[in-house]
């Protein structure tokens, strides 16, 4: 900074003074601390923004913002941009607002001014209908600012809720994200966590003091723990650049706000039947296969962006495109626990269904489900209320809903996977499907118990009855006769069927009774 009085400066000196001030502030906590970030394999807050946004598209706000804290020797403490870089820019030509916490400035800790800057960007997102992206790298509430930093976080949480369902909110966790601060990402739509980042409400030392449990920071709050065990995280990134690439890819499937459709890509008009689909799944309902293979055959360029791939892997969710249109996919995964629905699978799918519904993304559901998982642990864990989330989310969704029954579709789980009665717009079945209250073996043991017992050859009689039940109910024809299934199609024709359905349903409008909000079972 030039040490002249402004009264004696000419315009060149004033501009030079401005530029020097900016340069200093843009260095955050200083080159030495930035170098330390680099040595740890991380980018700086500004480098992350540079990698995310289109070249020269960043317009910063609040570079000169300053804290007002006078406690603990803070009065004269310089904190560049108050530890968070905020502004607007574009990602592949689309407007976003963002905040990137700067760990080099007092550990990216969040005080009053820091939070006010974030909140202003969130409100700009809301006013302009543009996604909000928050890059987290922070020691949490700035301890010196006491209640003011807590209040700041409170405002961030409140605005997360205001934005929810109006504009997509994406959190990228690149460093620490601890304490109550972790609740802001939890209130957003998607969390991308790098391998080096750590998220938890209370860290290992507090846990040891309170419960005596010993755990490393990685085992507690690393991305694998927060994806596989808790289902908090949606994507694991190798490093900062990978996290940003994931964020950009994710955005390509999303609209900018709830009044728009997702960007549509060019597509070929002609769809060639894919005969490989006819043999992609085993006919025997007990044999496993990877449902992602089915998805790959049907979606554009076999391009499927799976969400929460290692949490509740017995259900698969994610985004893809069909004839250039973005769709949300929910599919039972027969490769894991036979694709059964349990507590975590229900939570995972229900949340995704609600996201797609909020942002006008049609839902395609692939069904191959033996039922809900039996067991004391599941009952005590509340499978009734968790499973009910699936029913609630599908029934409440008004986006186009298309269901493809691939193979098994039994009982309550068949209903929960977006059946006709939950207001699916199309339900189509492959000819080998079995739609029934339960599998033939279980059904026969219940309804023909006495008859089997009395038979001369119980085993043979049981087998006969199983066969009879199969032929009566374990086909899609009974369901089609009762109009629970719109059509039965050759698997090879699935892509064409879905593309036509999406086309016809594009103008779908559905009005529901006015209410403040429904009460999804939690
Ligand atoms: C003020 C903080 C800070 C904080 C870190 N710093 N966290 N300053 N408030 N919350 C400062 C440090 O004093 C240090 O300043 C600099 O940031 C870097 O921190 P280091 O400890 O040197 O870095 P590192 O070893 O990498 O450890 C990072 C860390 C650790 C794991 C984040 O700093 C840490 O545990 N911080 C406290 C985390 C925490 O308990 N937060 C909860 C706050 S309460 P100098 O000047 O030396 O560079 C909370 C509740 C929120 O968040 C509620 C919202 C509802």
Image: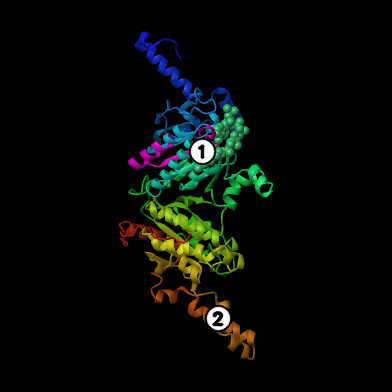
Furthest residue toward top:
8
Between the residue at mark 2 and the residue at mark 1, the CA separation in whole angstroms equals 59 Å
Residue in view at x 56 percent, y 26 percent = 34
**Residue 365 seen from this side:** yes
Q: Which of 472 and 255 lies nearest the eye of the viewer?
A: 255
What kind of element bears circle 1?
strand
Q: Position of residue 340 (x, y in %)?
A: 55, 65
Furthest residue toward front:
71
Q: Position of residue 254 (x, y in %)?
A: 41, 47
Q: Residues within 10 Å of mark 2 (few under 14, many from 20)?
A: some
Tell whether label 1 touches label 2 (CB within 8 Å). Answer: no
Q: Position of residue 470 (x, y in %)?
A: 52, 78
Instruction: Give the side of residue 10 with respect to residue 20, left or right.
Output: left
Instruction: Give the side of residue 171 with respect to residue 197, left or right.
Output: left
Q: Is residue 276 magenta?
A: no
Q: In this picture, which residue range is highlighted in magenta?
A: 117-145
Please, which colouring scheme is shown?
rainbow
Residue 483 image-quadrant placement: bottom left
Q: Which of 378 and 110 lies nearest the eye of the viewer?
A: 110
Residue depth check, mark 2 versus mark 1: number of the one nearer the observer? 1
Mark 1 within 8 Å of ligand 1, using the beta carbon: no
Q: Which residue is mark 1?
A: 136
Q: Which residue is mark 2?
A: 467
What kind of element bears circle 2?
helix
Instruction: Return the disc, 2 or 1, that comes first in the chain's sequence.
Output: 1
Q: Is residue 125 magenta?
A: yes
Q: Which mark is residue 227?
A: none
Q: Position of residue 253 (x, y in %)?
A: 42, 47
């Amino acid at each position: 900074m030039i040490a002249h009085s402004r009264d004696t400066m000419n315009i060149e000196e004033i501009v030079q003074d401005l530029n020097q001030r900016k340069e200093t502030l843009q260095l955050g906590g200083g080159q030495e601390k930035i170098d330390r970030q680099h040595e740890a394999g991380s980018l700086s807050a500004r480098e992350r923004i540079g990698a995310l946004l289109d070249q020269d598209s960043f317009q910063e706000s609040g570079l000169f913002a300053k804290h007002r804290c006078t406690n603990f020797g803070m009065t004269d403490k310089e904190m560049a941009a108050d530890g968070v870089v905020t502004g607007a820019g574009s990602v592949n030509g689309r407007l976003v607002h963002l905040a990137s916490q700067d760990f080099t400035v007092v550990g990216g800790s969040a005080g009053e001014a820091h939070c006010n800057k974030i909140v202003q960007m969130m409100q700009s997102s809301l006013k302009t209908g543009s996604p909000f992206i928050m890059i987290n790298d922070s020691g949490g509430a700035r301890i010196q600012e006491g209640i003011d930093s807590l209040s700041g976080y409170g405002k961030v949480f409140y605005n997360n809720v205001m934005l929810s369902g109006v504009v997509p909110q994406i959190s990228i966790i690149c460093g620490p994200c601890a304490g109550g601060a972790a609740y802001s990402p939890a209130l957003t739509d998607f969390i991308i966590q790098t391998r080096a980042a750590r998220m938890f409400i209370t860290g290992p030392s507090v846990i040891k003091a309170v419960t005596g449990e010993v755990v490393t920071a990685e085992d507690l709050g690393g991305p694998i723990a927060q994806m596989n065990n808790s289902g908090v995280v949606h994507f694991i990134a190798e490093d900062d650049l990978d996290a940003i690439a994931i964020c950009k890819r994710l955005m390509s499937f999303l609209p900018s706000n709830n009044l728009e459709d997702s960007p549509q890509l060019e597509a070929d008009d002609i769809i060639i039947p894919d005969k490989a689909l006819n043999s992609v799944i085993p006919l025997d309902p007990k044999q496993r296969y990877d449902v992602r293979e089915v998805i790959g055959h049907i979606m554009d360029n076999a391009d499927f962006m799976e969400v929460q791939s290692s949490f509740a892997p017995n259900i698969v969710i994610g985004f893809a495109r069909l004839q250039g249109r973005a769709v949300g996919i929910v599919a039972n995964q027969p490769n894991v626990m036979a694709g059964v629905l349990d507590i975590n699978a229900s939570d995972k799918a229900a949340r995704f269904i609600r996201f797609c519904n909020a942002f006008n993304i049609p839902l395609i559901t692939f069904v191959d489900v033996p039922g809900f998982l039996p067991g004391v642990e599941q009952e005590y864990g509340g499978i009734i209320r968790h499973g009910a989330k699936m029913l609630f989310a599908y029934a409440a969704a008004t986006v186009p809903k298309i269901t493809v029954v691939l193979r098994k579709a039994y009982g309550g789980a068949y209903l929960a996977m977006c059946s006709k009665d939950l207001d699916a717009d199309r339900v189509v079945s492959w000819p080998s499907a079995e739609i029934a209250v339960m599998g033939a073996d279980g059904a026969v043991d219940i309804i023909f118990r006495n008859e089997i017992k009395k038979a001369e050859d119980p085993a043979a009689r049981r087998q006969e009855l199983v066969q009879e039940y199969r032929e009566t109910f374990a086909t899609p024809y009974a369901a089609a006769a009762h109009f629970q299934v719109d059509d039965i199609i050759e698997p090879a024709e699935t892509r064409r069927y879905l593309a036509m359905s999406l086309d016809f349903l594009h103008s779908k409008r559905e009005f529901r009774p006015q209410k403040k909000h429904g009460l999804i079972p939690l």
